[in-house]
Image (spheres, coloured by chain):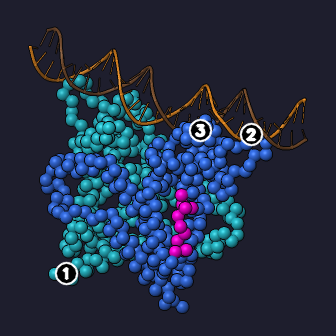
Chain colours: A cyan, B blue, C orange, D brown
Amino acid sequence: MIDDDPRPTLDLLWHGIAAPRRGPRHRLTVDAVVEAATGIAEEEGLAALSMRRVAAALGVGAATLYTYIPDKSALLALMVDTMIAEVPLPHTRPGTWREKMARQSREDLAGYRAHPWLVDLMAADHPIGPGALAWTDSAIRMFDGTGLSDREVLSVIESVDGYVRGHASRVVEADRTARRAGRSEAQLEYLARNLEPGRFTAIERLTEPGPDAEEVFEQGLGWLLDGVEHRIRAAADRP
Amino acid sequence: MIDDDPRPTLDLLWHGIAAPRRGPRHRLTVDAVVEAATGIAEEEGLAALSMRRVAAALGVGAATLYTYIPDKSALLALMVDTMIAEVPLPHTRPGTWREKMARQSREDLAGYRAHPWLVDLMAADHPIGPGALAWTDSAIRMFDGTGLSDREVLSVIESVDGYVRGHASRVVEADRTARRAGRSEAQLEYLARNLEPGRFTAIERLTEPGPDAEEVFEQGLGWLLDGVEHRIRAAADRP
DNA sequence: AAAAACTCCGTACACTGTTCGGGATTTCAA
DNA sequence: TTGAAATCCCGAACAGTGTACGGAGTTTTT
């Protein structure tokens, strides 16, 4: 068992591919491949993203892609890291740590909604690329001067990032359902007609419409930030 | 465009399949198919779950499965809803709403870790089945007597559920990486050797080891519950 | 006894990611 | 200048996927 060596992908993420010393010139670049792939994912979703589609979009044969990329999972890793690299860095924003973090979280959520395929790739265990590391580096800096220890800072970042991810997953799922017009209504109608009375009493007695996604997100985010604030104040009172 | 009618799957989720009036007896049941599929996902992961594998595990031909199930996505929906139905219901637990909710969240997280394929399916937009609806119904009941409005209750539930999901995604990703022994170390070693000094200064100055996942989860959960508590107290002071 | 309804499933189709081998092209070394 | 080495490109092929089709066999209804 060779154990699925992550190094080729890491090399690609961090160093790109070196220009060849002999042989015909490259007709493509790794960036072009990643861009084409991302374009397909944006327009038609991850399911439509096949190597042959990417190759066709670039006007080359499918096997040609393997000159630039070791395999599809590396391509996906590159797509993710490239996308992350485009996010403005948290610590460069104006305001207090709280303003920075709130803004950052909102924009991350918006990013996930704008690029739903990111949500699908989120749970896959990609190697860490420069984009992701730059994001983490910047996130740590957000808390410069707050008196929190490294460990506390990382804990806060991970806590909030987890929250954002989870809501991204929820919201994107809702977006997808809503996009297929009629599906959501069809389901509600079906449930309404098929529910045996008395089985789900708490749901039956609901009258108001449910809260919207943004409201829910803001509420929880606020609670988390309150918690962080508490912690920072506690740190300030330490020797 | 027929629009991918969700009704066949909904029927299966809510009513199962009716016994046939003529023709040979059923050799299988929907439950058996779901169980076989779940077994494969548990042992070898979602990627190994193909219709042919499921059929082979049941000793029938692949096409036979389509007598019981309209398509693979319906099978996945059944797997998810069946799994959810096995979770103990939140409102039946002892203690205050806070104790119930904390316990529920921890167990949900543990469930995701124990069944990582659930995390992969989480973001897909499955129709709502009886298991999921029972869970929601029970979650609402957790807040009986707290004075929160329906809307507030749902908002709290969704907020916390999003948090749990996000951390499940993070933790499962970490579990997967850790499971392939050596991968994680290989990556860290690679990064350590390839980082240009001065590029990621905040990360370079880290000394302590990062917080562990459980600690992070508990911290954020506590903050969220503090927020909920606040809200409940505010509700109590209302006319 | 015939017909209808139904399960089971071999086969086939269009797709997937990826490997292989060979032809074309460029560069390096002699 | 010539030959070898290195490299890109890619048609073809392989093993796999989800699923539609049509026919054979089985049971129930008429």
**Res. A19 image quadrant:** top left
Q: Quadrant of the C terminus of chain A?
A: bottom left
Q: Secondary structure at mark 2?
A: loop
Label pair 3/1, CB-CB below 8 angstroms: no
The residue positioned 51% from the left and 78% from the top of the image is B94
Q: Is residue B19 left or right of residue A141?
A: right
Question: Looking at the rendered structure, which numbered label has been put on residue B59?
Answer: 3
Is the residue B217 above or below the residue A119 in the image? below
Parent chain of label 1: A
Q: Secondary structure at mark 1?
A: loop
Q: Amino acid at mark 2?
A: Pro
**Which range of residues does the magenta coloring cover?**
B83-93
Q: Quadrant of the N terminus of chain A?
A: top left
Query: Gap between marks 3 and 2, in whole Å?
Result: 17 Å
Is the residue A32 above or below the residue A88 in the image? above
Is the residue B225 above or below the residue D9 in the image? below
The residue positioned 74% from the left and 49% from the top of the image is B19
Q: Position of residue A130 (x, y in %)?
A: 25, 51
Q: Is residue A79 left or right of residue A92?
A: right
Q: Report the residue marked by disc 2.
A: B24
Please tell me which of labels 3 and 2 falls first in the chain: 2
